């Protein structure tokens, strides 16, 4: 009789036959992913673990435990960056059919208005232009570490922290999609990391069923304020040509806010700088940026109603400076 691998019970719990398998408890999930991130699970077990989590469907308690494990492994509970930013902005979109990350201009405008923004992410699977490339056009750079991101936020009000710099181990798990051919719950985990323990956050999902999941996990983790939308490619980006809904959670209280369509145009310009500079003929892209600023306005509690959020967002955009950084 051979000794069973210490990680095997977690795979078995998820993979037993119908009526016998179950989701992991929050503590089981925290322990299991902690082992994975420490390299204590065999690679075969890791692939089975991730795909069984996906196949069973993501459970809020389970994902809360996964997020806690990821935060533990990345050292996010040490308090060194708590309060260093106001708004958490995850960017892990994939499948974008548009070229430009307009939401980046929205985040920068909010930062210039005095609302410190930490954006973190990985655009390894995007079909459009990724955030690091867009930052270069704007004369900005990604942060190289959490400490560097904290310094950038203190200096400019904004920082983009790649997942590869925040948590290389988590980044490797996320990139297993190249081998497995499917996203895993690690995508959800990354979006909910909140590396700076901010007082507010925005979050985008690609499929509407994930909205309740993200809100449920945030509630279990005692996140103070969160706005979730179905955005383009799963990014935090509002398409102003279509009505949509913002799901606002403050503590345990949830609210659905219908957001109206604002324009019939489509943002299709090439390059972010012309839009930032206010060059003519780019009204559709500009409206996309302002409409997305409104999501941050709602998350930060600067407005409670969509019309007021759109008004405040327009003021923030009008008040931006010519120089971004």
Image (spheres, rainbow, N blue to C red):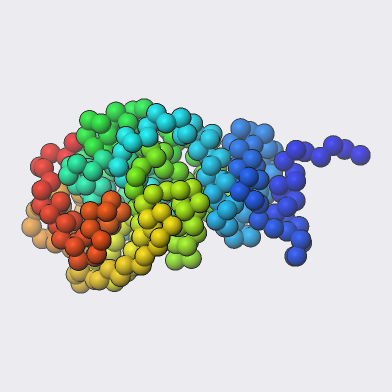
Residue 311: horizontal and vertical position, in percent?
Answer: 15, 61
Q: Which of 256 and 176 lies nearest the eye of the viewer?
A: 256
Q: Farthest residue toward the right?
A: 1
Which residue is depicted at the point 56% across and 46% down?
A: 66
Residue in the picture at 56% in, 40% down: 69
User: Which residue is at the front of the view, 118 or 322?
Assistant: 118
* 163 shown above or below 23: above
In the depicted view, which residue is nearer to us: 129 or 73?
Answer: 73
Residue 128, x across and y down, in percent: 34, 53
Residue furthest out toward the front: 252
Q: Residue placed farthest to the left in the image?
A: 280
From the viewer's perspective, is residue 213 above or below residue 257?
A: above
**Relative vertical location of residue 241 with respect to residue 215 in this rendering, above or below:** below
Placement of the N terminus among the 4 image quadrants: top right
Left-right relation of 309 to 194? left
Residue 165 occupies quadrant: top left
Please name whichever residue, 157 or 61, is drawn nearer the observer in this view of the structure. 61
Residue 175 picture location, percent across and down? 51, 44
Q: Is residue 256 left or right of residue 190?
A: left
Picture quarter with the C terminus: top left
Q: Is residue 137 visible?
A: no
Q: Residue at x 29, y 61 (%)?
A: 238
| Residue 196 makes an appearance in the image | yes
């Amino acid at each position: 009789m051979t000794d069973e691998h210490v990680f095997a019970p977690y795979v078995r719990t998820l993979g037993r036959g119908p009526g016998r398998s179950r989701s992991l408890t929050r503590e089981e999930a925290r322990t299991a992913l902690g082992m994975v991130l420490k390299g204590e699970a065999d690679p075969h077990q890791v692939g089975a673990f991730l795909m069984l989590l996906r196949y069973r469907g993501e459970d809020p308690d389970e994902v809360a435990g996964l997020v806690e494990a990821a935060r533990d492994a990345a050292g996010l509970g040490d308090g060194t960056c708590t309060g260093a930013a106001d708004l958490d902005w995850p960017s892990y979109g994939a499948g974008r059919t548009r070229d430009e990350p307009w939401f980046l201009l929205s985040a920068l405008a909010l930062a210039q208005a005095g609302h410190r923004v930490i954006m973190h992410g990985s655009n390894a699977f995007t079909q459009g232009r990724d955030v690091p490339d867009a930052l270069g056009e704007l004369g900005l750079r990604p942060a190289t570490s959490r400490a560097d991101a904290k310094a950038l936020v203190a200096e400019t009000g904004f920082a983009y922290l790649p997942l590869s710099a925040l948590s290389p181990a988590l980044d490797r798990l996320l990139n297993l999609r190249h081998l497995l051919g499917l996203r895993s719950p690690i995508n959800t985990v990354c979006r909910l990391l909140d590396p700076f323990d901010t007082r507010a956050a925005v979050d985008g999902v690609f499929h509407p069923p994930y909205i309740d999941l993200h809100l449920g996990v945030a509630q279990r983790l005692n996140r103070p304020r969160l706005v979730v939308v179905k955005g383009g490619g799963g990014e935090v980006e509002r398409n102003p040509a279509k009505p949509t809904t913002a799901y606002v959670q403050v503590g345990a209280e949830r609210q659905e806010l219908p957001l109206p369509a604002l324009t019939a145009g489509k943002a299709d310009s090439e390059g972010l700088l012309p839009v930032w500079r206010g060059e003519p003929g780019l009204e559709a892209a500009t409206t996309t940026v302002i409409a997305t600023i409104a999501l941050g306005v709602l998350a930060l509690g600067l407005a409670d109603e969509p019309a007021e959020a759109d008004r405040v967002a327009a003021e923030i955009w009008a008040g931006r400076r010519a120089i971004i950084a």
